[in-house]
Image (tube, rainbow, N blue to C red):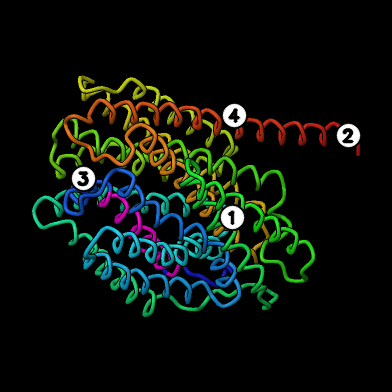
């Protein structure tokens, strides 16, 4: 199928996928910067502010795999376009939110739209670009995500300071409408590639419900409802996997059960669990402890994204040349080094040290993200590209949810439901340091898993070469 696309068509698909992939990170980054202002307007504590972000990742992770399979059967373009339309609707709801709970609901709807886009953008690129070009294309798309994140930090801070945080969502609506016009007029075809056109509705329900309950349970594992949800989610996922073994048209191809693919998903979860919320915590630190305004906070938080944007395309190309497992491990270790610099964070910590930690965070992410995607997509049949993309993104979003869950649990233990005031700064700093300790452990664990998989595969190849004939 890749031979049917000219270089111009490839560029257009890459641009469309990049714009769609950049919109959600723009919102996430903008909300990170705007969180203290949102908290002040709605009198919300850190736990509730955490749910503004967590709700998005909760629904996005839950719907990615079913939408990926629907895209394989009915066309990636249709699903991608519907996701953009969902962005517009949810942005309007979020901009008009009268309280924190409506805002959280709006962010949950955005997550459903993001599942449609995240579940198809990498699939579109994998279908259009041949294997020897795919790593670079994926690297550029990942870079676009971080360009969106950078723009959100900078523009989100400026909008929050001079216009108000609600204007952030209006900008997203404009981006989504522009991308809708582009994909409807300039991208041809639908890219439906599955040879079997039968759905497994029950499998989709079990998959979505199991992930939704499990991820929600992870976010609230510190309390009884959360633990019950986690247990229920794991049971539902167990029923899903049992059904997959016996249905003639499984939602998930058997290749997803290989050690190589499963390890990529596990590593993705662990790494993002130890990296994502670093910027969120430092946004709160800059504004609550150092009294820096949102606009300057956004500028400071751009540091890791600059390194990600600069290194991302080269990281993707590098994973085409050497084992992506080794590149991923290097990224996890670099991120861990950055987190290590923050485990003693206090009111007197030099700003240059915090900026250095942010730079290392960006380099680590730039090395890790394109390589883990290349690692995962290389072992799955073409007709399951959408599902592979969905599982990879689900892993990433599940990891991000874990990262947010650490914040919610730790701050719930250390601060209860207290808002951050001058009197609560010591408890806030203690909570932040505890989170960074957890993130350090997760970063090291991600590197270990990636290296173990590399060594296992290297031994397997060496053994094959030593067998005569």
Disc 1, SS = helix
The answer to the question of whether label 4 and label 2 lie on touching residues, with beta carbons closer than 8 A, is no
* Disc marking residue 448: 4
Is residue 55 rendered to the left or right of residue 260? left
Query: On the image, numbered disc 1 is attached to which residue?
Result: 131
Q: Compared to 311, does 152 lie above or below?
A: below
Tell me which numbered mark, 4 or 2, is placed earlier along the sequence: 4
Query: On the image, numbered disc 2 is attached to which residue?
Result: 467
Residue at figure coordinates x 51%, y 70% from the top left = 5
Tell me which numbered mark, 3 or 4, is placed earlier along the sequence: 3
Q: Report which quarter residue 201 is drawn in.
A: bottom right
Tell me which numbered mark, 1 or 4, is placed earlier along the sequence: 1
Q: Report which quarter residue 356 is drawn in.
A: top left
Tell me which numbered mark, 3 or 2, is placed earlier along the sequence: 3
Disc 4, SS = helix
Q: Nearer the viewer, residue 421 or 177?
A: 421
Q: Real-space Cα distance between discs 3 and 4?
A: 36 Å
The answer to the question of whether label 2 and label 1 lie on touching residues, with beta carbons closer than 8 A, is no
Magenta-highlighted stretch: main secondary structure?
A: helix
Is residue 304 rendered to the left or right of residue 207? left
Query: On the image, numbered disc 3 is attached to which residue?
Result: 36
Q: Real-space Cα distance between discs 3 and 1?
A: 44 Å
């Amino acid at each position: 199928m890749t031979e049917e696309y000219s270089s111009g068509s490839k560029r257009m698909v890459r641009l469309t996928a990049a714009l769609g992939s950049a919109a959600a990170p723009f919102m996430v980054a903008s909300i990170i910067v705007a969180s203290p202002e949102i908290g002040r307007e709605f009198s919300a504590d850190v736990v509730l502010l955490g749910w503004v972000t967590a709700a998005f990742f909760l629904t996005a992770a839950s719907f990615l795999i079913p939408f990926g399979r629907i895209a394989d059967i009915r066309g990636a373009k249709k699903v991608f376009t519907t996701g953009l339309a969902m962005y517009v609707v949810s942005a309007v709801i979020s901009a008009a939110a009268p309280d924190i709970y409506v805002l959280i609901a709006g962010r949950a709807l955005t997550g459903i739209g993001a599942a449609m886009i995240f579940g198809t953008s990498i699939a579109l690129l994998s279908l259009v670009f041949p294997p020897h070009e795919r790593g670079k294309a994926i690297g550029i798309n990942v870079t676009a995500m971080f360009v969106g994140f950078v723009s959100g930090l900078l523009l989100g801070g400026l909008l929050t300071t001079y216009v108000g945080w609600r204007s952030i969502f209006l900008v997203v609506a404009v981006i989504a409408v522009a991308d809708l016009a582009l994909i409807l007029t300039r991208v041809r075809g639908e890219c439906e590639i599955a040879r079997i056109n039968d759905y497994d509705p029950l499998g989709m329900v079990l998959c979505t419900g199991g992930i939704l309950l499990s991820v929600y349970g992870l976010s609230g594992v510190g309390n009884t409802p959360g633990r019950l949800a986690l247990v229920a989610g794991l049971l539902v996922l167990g029923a899903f996997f049992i059904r997959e073994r016996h249905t003639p048209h499984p939602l998930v191809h058997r290749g997803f059960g290989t050690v190589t693919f499963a390890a990529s998903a596990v590593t993705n979860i662990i790494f993002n669990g130890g990296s994502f919320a670093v910027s969120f915590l430092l946004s709160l630190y800059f504004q609550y402890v150092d009294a820096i305004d949102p606009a300057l906070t956004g500028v400071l938080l751009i540091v890791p994204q600059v390194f990600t944007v600069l290194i991302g395309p080269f990281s993707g190309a590098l994973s085409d040349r050497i084992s992506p497992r080794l590149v991923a491990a290097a990224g996890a270790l670099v991120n861990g080094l950055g987190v290590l610099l923050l485990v003693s964070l206090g009111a007197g910590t030099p700003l240059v040290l915090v900026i250095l930690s942010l730079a290392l965070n960006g380099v680590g992410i730039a090395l890790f993200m394109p390589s883990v995607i290349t690692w995962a997509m290389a072992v799955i049949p073409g007709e399951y590209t959408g599902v592979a993309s969905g599982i990879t993104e689900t892993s990433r979003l599940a990891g991000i949810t874990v990262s947010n869950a650490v914040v919610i649990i730790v701050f719930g233990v250390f601060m209860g439901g207290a808002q951050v005031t001058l009197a609560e700064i010591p408890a806030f700093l203690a909570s932040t340091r505890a989170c960074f300790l957890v993130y350090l452990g997760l970063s090291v664990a991600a590197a270990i898993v990636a290296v173990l998989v590399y060594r296992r595969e290297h031994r397997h190849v060496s053994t094959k070469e030593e067998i005569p004939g």
